[in-house]
Image: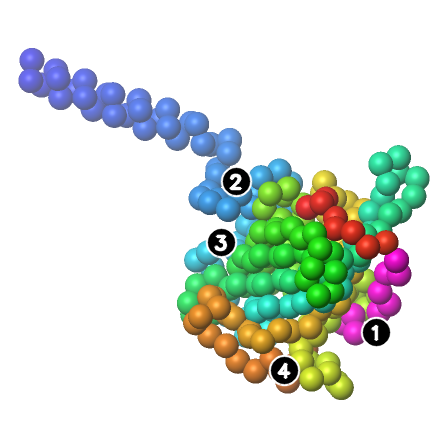
Amino acid sequence: MKRYNSYLAMLLIAVTSFTLSSCYDDDDDWYWDDPYGWYDDYRGWGWNNNYDTEWDSNNNELLQMAQTLCGEWYGPVTYSYLSDDGQSRKTDNFYADMEFYQYNNAYRSLSGNGVEIDYENQNRSGNSQTLKFTWYIDESTGDIYIKYINSGATFVLDYGSSQRGFHLGYEKGSPVDTFYGYMIGTGKVNGDVIYIDLERQNTNSYAKPEISTRSIKSSHSFGKGFTQRPIQSSNTQLNNRR
């Protein structure tokens, strides 16, 4: 009887193992620990598959770019989008305070999270809204991806484009770093375009605001969109598409 019970126990373990492995055979190309919900409906184009919170990069140029991105930025924003009937474009103007934080204390990550507070007026008065987002830099292209958590709306800043790209960092003649250019909507916000024109505020925070600060003017810049033209609009109101 003891030998029979041992045999039965081994058989149950084997059957259980086979059943569990079968559950994930069809999905093991995407089944991974995704605490921030980055994959969601974007499995088709691989949202941030290699840039979780533990990922460290050896690309020093992009790491410098990530460290430059981190910190607080403020300035005017123009949001352009198709009308509900798809026949015309609408634009909303407002001001945004964007704070980028980098994952891990060693500052070796090309990803992180952030908070954006939108204001109706330049002096941060009137209506406002707070949006949380995650971000990462694609190591193969240098493009910056930003995904807003509540809506899932995802935008890309094209590193190599001179017409619809971005500029980040040092700007000749400016007393502070600047961050301006186009955020191009993808997926559910395909067709949406955001033009940002931001200046660095009083700190460049790599991981947490209280951990690390440095000069608000750096000696390097990233992106090729330093000559592009902003979107023109006179309509002032907050935008809730994110």
Mark 3 lies on a secondary structure that is loop
Amino acid identity at mark 3: Asp
Mark 2 lies on a secondary structure that is loop
Q: Residues within 10 Å of mark 4 (few under 14, many from 20)?
A: some
| Residue that numbered label 3 is attached to | 52
Of residues 92 and 184, the one drawn nearer to the viewer in this rendering: 92
Residue lying farthest to the left in this orientation: 2
| Residue that numbered label 4 is attached to | 217
Whether 241 is among the magenta residues is no
| Residue that numbered label 2 is attached to | 30
Amino acid identity at mark 4: Lys
Of the residues under marks 1 and 4, which one precedes in the sequence? 4
Amino acid identity at mark 2: Trp
Amino acid identity at mark 1: Thr
Where is residue 111 shown, x and y percent of the image? 54, 60
How far apart are the alpha carbons under marks 1 and 2? Answer: 40 Å
Q: Are marks 1 and 4 in contact (CB under 8 Å)?
A: no
Of residues 121 and 160, the one drawn nearer to the viewer in this rendering: 121
